[in-house]
Image: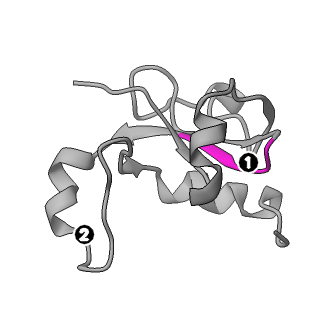
Amino acid sequence: MCYFILAFFLRFTDCYINMNTQPMFLRRLGPDPHENGAQTPACRGCPDIFELASGDFAIIGIDITEASEKHLPPTAGCGPDERIVLVPRKTLVLAKSDIPSKI
């Protein structure tokens, strides 16, 4: 089974406001996952990382919430409106240079 999940990472105080607006994608972080004819691990071309106009980030990855939620550290939790998303190491490492270093 393949999942296409878009997870938003928002500041808690902005959740209500931002989740009721349409996200504006500014740019992809890292290379296009299909660059040079590369194949991706999931059905619809994920994984991918995007910066939003709000300054937050959107992640497209494989939903692993059900299998991993019970293994989270005691101080971590996944709310009913959140998903745990698998992003391959390669995707995050290649995006590192595009991730802003300042808030």
Residue 79 vs 74, above or below: the answer is above
> Which residue was labeled with disc 2?
72
Q: Quadrant of residue 54?
A: top right
Q: Amino acid at mark 2?
A: Leu
Report whether residue 79 is seen: yes
Q: Position of residue 8 (x, y in %)?
A: 56, 43
- Residue displayed at 70% across by 29% down: 23
- Residue displayed at 35% across by 51% down: 84
> Which residue was labeled with disc 1?
30
- SS assignment at label 1: loop
Q: Quadrant of residue 25?
A: top right
- Residue displayed at 32% across by 52% down: 79
Q: Which residues are magenta?
A: 54-59
Name the one closer to the observer, 68 or 13: 13
Q: What is the count of numbered marks?
A: 2
Q: Amino acid at mark 1?
A: Gly
Report whether residue 11 is seen: no
Q: Position of residue 18 (x, y in %)?
A: 66, 38
Q: Position of residue 66 (x, y in %)?
A: 18, 46
In the rendered image, the quadrant that contains the C terminus is bottom right
Residue 16 shown in magenta: no
- Residue displayed at 81% across by 56% down: 98
- SS assignment at label 2: loop
